[in-house]
Image (tube, helix red, strand yellow):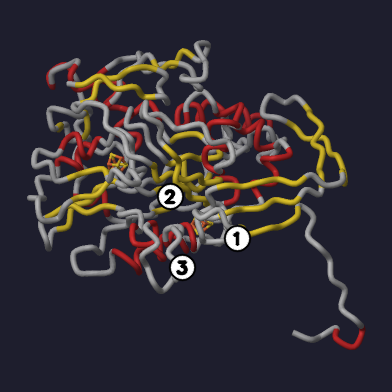
């Protein structure tokens, strides 16, 4: 058992292998606030990678409705319950100990790697409806076949009103948190820094690419033991009966490598199918530099680095699992903070503050979501005139003034060529009378 540093937990943690890091890491930010649940991303992925026999139940990208939905069914509730059983009431954060190498504080509970080494099966009194299995290296469970049916169960189903709300007959949808709420959670493999799937594989069939941190399953080595399916806390490694192997998101690596001649004629990296197709403009993908120490190298002009490390507006999904996922989310502003703290760690309130009343640079960067499918490696803001100011309400109920400037924002590709430029205020063009109806 190695000892590795997990910056999302703010501490060292146990992991079956020693530290090993790629030169760059595939990472992405999803802005939950903007998602309309259209599933265009889901179908873009399905029609590219998982349309064959034996893959009918396989959705590498899915969008589920929280709090009740999940694919496979109740995946997060089940792993949270296993962790709670393994470490009763110990899954807590010490958010006071925040610093640069522990931006969310220190997680004092047990990860999926630590919980399994700290107990025997008998010590966990698992509810009978959760299969209790583990690879011996990672705490997890193997979903039942029917858990993969109906991938969008509970779609658009809101959380029931609270008892207080029913008594008061109060507003269902007034900020800072709505009484009746739901949100769409977009999910792909997180290409984790410390993948649980990789840790659990007895065949060493799973590897992390040194050039971009993408986690792949070598189909020629896989024997279909399903240890990765059992171990991945996000349940993003999926078994295929027709080939008797497991499969997972491949991060559209030909696009990432700039080798898809149809879409990347000049060879620069472009974003995955699910990102490029996003109708709600909620997704941005990037590659972040990894330093010699294995941590993200300081690069505040990289959009993903800026959102995650500088603004802390985008947070990892269930960081307490311990895999150091490389997918980050801007949390939904209308959902109770206690729920968001469980899902994204203790940074949720500050992240919503940063979103509701964004800095000048952040407001500019938000405009770059989905204006190009080429990966933006650097962005720059050129300051413009002030055009207005507004009062906004923060999650704490406090009010703050948001100033808006007509700044210009520019994005650059892997070769540092300008690929997009736009202003905060959209220009208005008035048609002449003769061309009112022209297209
Ligand atoms: S999300 Fe799951 S399948 Fe993807 S790298 Fe992490 S542990 Fe592996
Ligand atoms: S395409 Fe975008 S807006 Fe539509 S469901 Fe997917 S993430 Fe949400």
Task: Point out the image quarter for the C terminus.
Answer: bottom right
- Name the secondary structure under disc 3: loop
Q: Which mark is residue 419?
A: 1
At horizontal 29% and vertical 43% (from top left) the residue drawn is 210
Q: CA distance from mark 2 to mark 3?
A: 36 Å
Could you say which quadrant of the image residue 137 lies in?
A: top left
At horizontal 84% and vertical 39% (from top left) the residue drawn is 390
Q: CA distance from mark 3 to mark 1?
A: 13 Å
- Tell me where residue 83 appears, x and y as whole percent: 29, 24
Q: Nearer the viewer, mark 2 or mark 1?
A: 1
At horizontal 86% and vertical 39% (from top left) the residue drawn is 389
Comes first in the chain, label 3 or label 1: 3
Left or right: where does residue 203 sit relative to residue 38? left
- Tell me where residue 261 appears, x and y as whole percent: 39, 71
- Mark 2, residue position: 64
Q: CA distance from mark 2 to mark 1?
A: 33 Å
Left or right: where does residue 226 sit relative to residue 28? left
- Mark 3, residue position: 266
Task: Point out the image quarter for the N terminus.
Answer: top left
């Amino acid at each position: 058992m190695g000892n590795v540093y997990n910056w999302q937990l703010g501490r060292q943690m146990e992991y079956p292998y020693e530290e090993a890091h790629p030169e760059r890491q595939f990472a992405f930010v999803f802005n939950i606030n903007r998602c309309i649940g259209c599933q265009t991303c889901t179908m873009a992925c399905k029609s590219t990678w998982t349309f064959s026999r034996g893959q009918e139940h396989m959705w590498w990208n899915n969008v589920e409705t929280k709090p009740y939905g999940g694919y496979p069914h109740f995946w997060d509730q089940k792993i949270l319950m296993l962790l709670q059983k393994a470490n009763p009431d110990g899954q807590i954060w010490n958010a006071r100990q925040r610093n640069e190498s522990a931006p969310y504080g220190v997680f004092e509970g047990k990860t999926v790697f630590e919980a399994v080494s700290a107990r025997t099966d008998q010590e966990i009194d698992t509810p009978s409806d959760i299969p209790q299995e583990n690879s011996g290296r990672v705490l997890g469970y193997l979903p039942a076949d029917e858990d993969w049916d109906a991938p969008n169960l509970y779609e658009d189903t809101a959380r029931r009103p609270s008892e207080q709300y029913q008594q008061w007959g109060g507003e269902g949808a007034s900020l800072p948190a709505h009484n009746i709420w739901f949100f769409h959670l977009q999910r792909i493999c997180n290409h984790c820094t410390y993948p649980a799937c990789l840790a659990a594989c007895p065949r060493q069939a799973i590897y992390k690419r040194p050039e971009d941190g993408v986690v792949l399953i070598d189909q020629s080595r896989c024997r279909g033991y399903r240890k990765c399916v059992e171990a991945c806390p996000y349940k993003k490694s999926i078994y295929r009966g027709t080939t008797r192997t497991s499969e997972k998101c491949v991060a559209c690596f030909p696009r990432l490598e700039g080798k898809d001649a149809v879409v990347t004629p000049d060879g620069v990296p472009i974003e995955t199918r699910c990102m490029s197709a996003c109708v709600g403009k909620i997704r941005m993908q990037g590659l972040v530099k990894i330093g010699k120490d294995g941590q993200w190298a300081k690069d505040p002009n990289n959009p993903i680095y800026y959102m995650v490390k500088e603004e802390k507006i985008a947070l990892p999904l269930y960081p307490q699992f311990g895999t150091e996922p490389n997918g980050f989310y801007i949390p939904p502003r209308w959902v109770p903070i206690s729920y968001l703290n469980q899902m994204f760690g203790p940074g949720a309130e500050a992240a919503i503050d940063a979103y509701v009343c964004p800095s000048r640079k952040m407001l500019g960067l938000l405009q770059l979501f989905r204006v190009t499918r080429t990966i933006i490696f650097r962005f720059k803001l050129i300051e413009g005139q002030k055009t207005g100011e507004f009062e906004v309400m923060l999650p704490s109920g406090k009010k703050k003034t948001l100033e808006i400037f007509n700044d210009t924002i520019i994005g650059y590709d892997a070769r540092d060529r300008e690929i997009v430029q736009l202003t905060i205020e959209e220009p208005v063009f008035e048609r002449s009378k003769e061309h009112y109806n022209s297209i």
